[in-house]
C-alpha cells in the first residue's frame, strides 16, 4: 500500500533532479507510475475478498494517529487512476510542443498522482483535506505552466472556486471535530451511528456536501469545468478529465456513503435532485456546443450526475453500479480527451464545422475515437453499457420513475452528441482541410492502451462488476473497515483513552 | 470570549466573501485570505476555548486543552500560506508589465 503512495513521490523528486534531461525524467516518471500501478493491482487482488488493510503511521493507535486504509473501493480506484496517469505520461511526453514544458510536466504529474493516491488511501477527514490541497496545487501549477496566453480567465475561475470549496471543507472538518472529537472515518461512523439529533450532523455536513459538489462539478457549481478544460494541452486535459472530478466523487461516496451513512445519509434528497439536474443540464449543454472538447467537457458534467445518482439511490445495487461507472468513466473520458488532442494535432482544430472527412484521411483515428465514444454512449459490448445497465436496473429496483426516465433520456442524448461529433469530423466534406500533420506515436500508443482497457472491461464485465459489488458491499458493511482501523477490541469510548495514547 | 471569536469569524467571512466577488485583480485573492483566516479560527475554536491551559499532559496544569485543533490550524495555515504565495505569483504573471 505504501508503495502506491511513495513510488510517484520518489519519482517526482527524481524527475526534479533529472532536470533538463527530460528524456531521463520521462523514463523515471513512467517507471514510478508503473511500480505504483503494479502495487495497486496487487492491492486490488488482495482486497478482492473484502479484506481491509490499515497502516498506522508512526505506530500511533487509530483514532489518534494518522491512518492509511486500503479497502476494495480505494484499491480499485487506485488501479484505474494509475492506468490513466500512465497513459497521460506517455502521451504527454510525445504531445507537448515545447521541450521545456516537459521538464515541469513529469514532476507535476507525479505529485498529482501522489495526491490522488493519498486521497484514496487516507482514513481521516483532515488528511483528506491535506491531500486535496496537494492535488489542487499540482493541478494549478500544471494549468499555469501549460496554458497559453489566451483564456486565462477559465483557469482562474477554476482556481478560485476550488479554493473556496477547500475552505468550506476545512470549516466543516473543524465543526465536525468540535462536535464529535474525532476525524477518523471509522471512529466518526461509530460516534454518529447512534446519533438521533439529525440537525447536529446535517448542519456541518452541508458544508462538506458543498465542498465535494464543487470539486466533482455537480450542476450549480459546475461552470468552472467547461471554462477551464478545453484550453489545456491534450495530455493534461485527459488527466484532469479522468481524475479531478472523480476524486471529488470518491470523497462523496466515501464520506456520505460510508462514514455518515446508515439507513440513509444526510442531504440524500438534495443529492438526488442535484444529480438529476446535473445529468440533464450537462447533456443539454453539450448539445449546444460546437467544439469537440467543449462537448466532451459538458459530458463530464452529465456523467458525474449519473454517478451522483448512484449514490443518491443508495442501495447496494446502485452503489455497485456507481463504482463500476467510476471505473469505466475515468478511462473512457481520459481517452476521449486524448483522441480530441490527437485530432487537433492532426488537423489543427477540433471545431465541428470545417474539419470533416477524417475517416478518409485517417481511419485509425476513427477507430481510436469510436471505441471510447461508443462506450460512453453505452453500446453493448463495451464497458459503458454495463455501467448504464447496472444503474438503470438499480433505478428500476428502487421504483423511482423520474430517475428511470432521466437515465434513459440522457443516454439517448449522449448517443446523439457522439454521433454529432462523428458525422462532423469523420464523415462530412473535407473543405477547409489543413495539411495532415504527423501525430506522435506516444499519443497513439497511450490512446490505444486506454481503448484496449475499455474493451477488456467490457469483455470481462463479470469479474470487474464483481469487484465493484464487493467494494460497494464494503461501503455498507463497515465492520471490516472499522476493525482494521480501530483494532479488534471495542471501539474507544469518547474521551477515555486519550491520556494513554498521547504520552 | 467565544462570542467575541464568533463575531470575529462572522466578520472575517463576510468581508472575505465581499472581496471575493470584487472587480479588481487582487480582490479575489484578498477575499480568499480573509476567508482562510475565518476557517482557521473555526478550526481553532473547535477544540473548545480554555483560558491559560497548556496543550500538554503532565505539565502540572490541572486542565489541559486539546492539542489537536492547534496542530490542525498550524497545518492549515502553512497550506494556506503556500497557496496564497502561488496565487500571488499567478496574479503577477497575469498583470501586463
Image: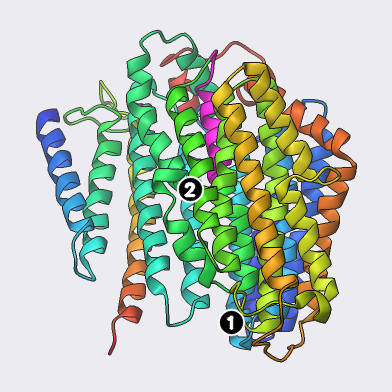
Mark 2 lies on residue? A217
Q: Do the residues marked 2 and 1 share a common chain?
A: yes
**Image label count:** 2
Residue at the spot x=61%, y=87% of the render?
A98
The answer for which chain carries disc 2 is: A
How crowded pointer 2 is (Cα within 10 Å; few <14, some 14-19, many 20+) is rated as: many
Q: Earlier in the sequence, mark 2 or mark 1?
A: 1
Q: Is residue A155 left or right of residue B8?
A: right
Which numbered tag is attached to residue A137? none
Q: Viewer-proximal residue, A280 or A246?
A: A280
Residue at the spot x=31%, y=74% of the render?
B91
The answer for which chain carries disc 1 is: A
Q: Viewer-proximal residue, B96 or A128?
A: B96
Which residue lies most toward the right here?
A459
Mark 1 lies on residue? A101
How crowded pointer 1 is (Cα within 10 Å; few <14, some 14-19, many 20+) is rated as: some
Residue at the spot x=59%, y=86% of the render?
A100
Q: Is residue A5 visible?
A: no
Q: Position of residue B57 (x, y in %)?
A: 36, 27
- Verify whether residue A260 appears in magenta: yes
- Verify whether residue A248 appears in magenta: yes
Q: Quadrant of residue A421?
A: bottom right
Q: Position of residue A487 (x, y in %)?
A: 64, 20
Q: Secondary structure at mark 1?
A: helix
Q: Quadrant of residue A242?
A: bottom right
Q: Secondary structure at mark 2?
A: loop
Q: Is residue A114 left or right of residue B52?
A: right
Range of the magenta residues? A247-263
Amino acid at each position: 500500500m505504501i508503495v502506491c503512495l511513495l513510488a510517484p513521490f520518489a519519482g517526482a523528486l527524481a524527475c526534479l533532479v533529472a532536470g533538463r534531461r527530460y528524456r531521463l525524467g520521462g523514463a523515471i516518471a513512467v517507471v514510478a507510475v508503473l511500480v505504483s500501478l503494479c502495487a495497486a493491482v496487487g492491492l486490488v487482488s488482495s482486497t478482492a475478498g473484502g479484506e481491509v488493510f490499515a497502516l498506522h503511521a508512526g505506530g500511533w493507535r487509530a483514532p489518534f494517529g494518522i491512518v492509511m486504509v486500503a479497502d476494495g473501493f480505494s484499491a480499485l480506484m487506485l488501479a484505474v487512476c494509475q492506468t490513466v496517469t500512465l497513459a497521460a505520461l506517455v502521451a504527454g511526453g510525445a504531445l507537448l510542443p515545447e521541450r521545456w514544458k516537459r521538464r515541469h510536466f513529469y514532476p507535476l504529474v507525479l505529485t498529482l498522482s501522489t495526491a490522488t493516491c493519498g486521497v484514496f488511501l487516507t482514513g481521516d477527514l483532515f488528511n483528506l483535506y491535506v491531500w486535496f490541497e496537494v492535488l489542487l496545487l499540482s493541478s494549478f501549477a500544471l494549468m499555469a505552466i501549460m496554458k497559453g496566453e489566451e483564456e486565462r480567465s477559465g483557469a482562474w475561475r477554476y482556481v478560485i472556486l476550488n479554493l473556496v470549496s477547500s475552505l468550506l471543507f476545512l470549516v466543516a472538518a473543524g465543526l465536525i471535530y468540535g462536535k464529535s472529537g474525532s476525524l477518523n472515518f471509522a471512529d466518526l461512523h461509530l460516534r454518529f451511528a447512534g446519533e438521533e439529533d439529525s440537525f447536529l450532523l446535517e448542519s456541518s455536513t452541508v458544508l462538506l456536501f458543498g465542498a465535494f459538489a464543487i470539486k466533482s462539478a455537480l450542476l450549480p457549481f459546475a461552470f468552472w469545468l467547461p471554462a477551464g478544460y478545453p484550453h489545456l494541452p491534450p495530455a493534461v486535459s485527459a488527466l484532469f478529465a479522468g481524475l479531478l472530478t472523480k476524486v471529488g466523487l470518491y470523497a462523496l461516496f466515501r464520506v456520505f456513503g460510508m462514514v455518515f451513512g446508515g439507513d440513509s445519509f444526510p442531504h440524500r434528497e438534495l443529492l438526488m435532485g442535484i444529480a438529476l439536474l446535473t445529468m440533464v443540464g450537462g447533456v443539454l449543454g453539450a448539445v449546444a456546443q460546437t467544439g469537440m472538447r467543449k462537448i466532451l467537457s459538458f459530458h463530464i458534467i452529465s456523467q458525474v450526475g449519473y454517478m451522483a445518482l448512484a449514490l443518491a439511490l443508495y442501495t447496494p445495487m446502485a452503489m455497485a453500479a456507481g463504482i463500476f461507472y467510476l471505473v469505466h468513466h475515468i478511462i473512457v473520458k481520459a481517452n476521449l480527451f486524448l483522441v480530441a488532442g490527437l485530432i487537433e494535432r492532426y488537423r489543427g482544430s477540433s471545431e465541428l464545422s470545417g474539419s470533416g472527412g477524417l475517416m478518409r484521411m485517417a481511419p485509425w483515428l476513427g477507430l481510436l475515437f469510436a471505441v471510447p465514444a461508443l462506450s460512453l454512449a453505452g453500446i453493448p459490448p463495451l464497458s459503458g453499457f454495463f455501467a448504464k445497465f447496472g444503474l438503470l436496473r438499480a433505478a428500476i429496483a428502487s421504483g423511482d420513475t423520474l430517475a428511470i426516465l432521466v437515465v434513459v433520456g440522457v443516454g439517448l442524448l449522449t448517443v446523439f452528441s457522439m454521433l454529432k461529433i462523428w458525422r462532423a469530423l469523420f464523415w462530412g466534406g473535407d473543405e477547409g482541410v489543413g495539411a495532415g500533420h504527423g501525430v506522435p506515436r506516444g499519443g497513439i500508443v497511450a490512446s490505444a492502451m486506454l481503448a484496449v482497457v475499455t474493451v477488456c472491461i467490457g469483455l470481462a464485465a463479470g469479474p470487474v462488476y464483481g469487484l465493484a459489488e464487493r467494494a460497494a458491499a464494503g461501503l455498507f458493511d463497515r465492520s471490516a473497515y472499522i476493525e482494521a482501523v480501530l483494532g479488534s477490541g471495542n471501539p474507544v469510548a469518547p474521551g477515555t483513552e486519550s491520556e494513554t495514547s498521547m504520552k | 470570549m467565544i462570542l467575541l471569536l464568533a463575531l470575529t469569524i462572522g466578520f472575517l467571512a463576510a468581508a472575505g466573501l465581499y472581496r471575493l466577488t470584487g472587480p479588481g485583480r487582487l480582490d479575489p485573492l484578498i477575499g480568499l485570505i480573509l476567508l482562510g483566516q475565518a476557517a482557521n479560527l473555526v478550526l481553532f475554536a473547535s477544540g473548545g476555548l480554555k483560558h491559560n491551559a497548556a496543550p500538554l499532559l503532565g505539565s502540572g496544569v490541572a486542565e489541559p486543552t486539546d492539542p489537536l485543533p492547534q496542530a490542525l490550524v498550524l497545518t492549515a495555515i502553512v497550506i494556506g500560506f503556500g497557496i496564497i504565495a502561488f496565487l500571488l505569483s499567478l496574479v503577477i504573471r497575469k498583470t501586463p508589465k
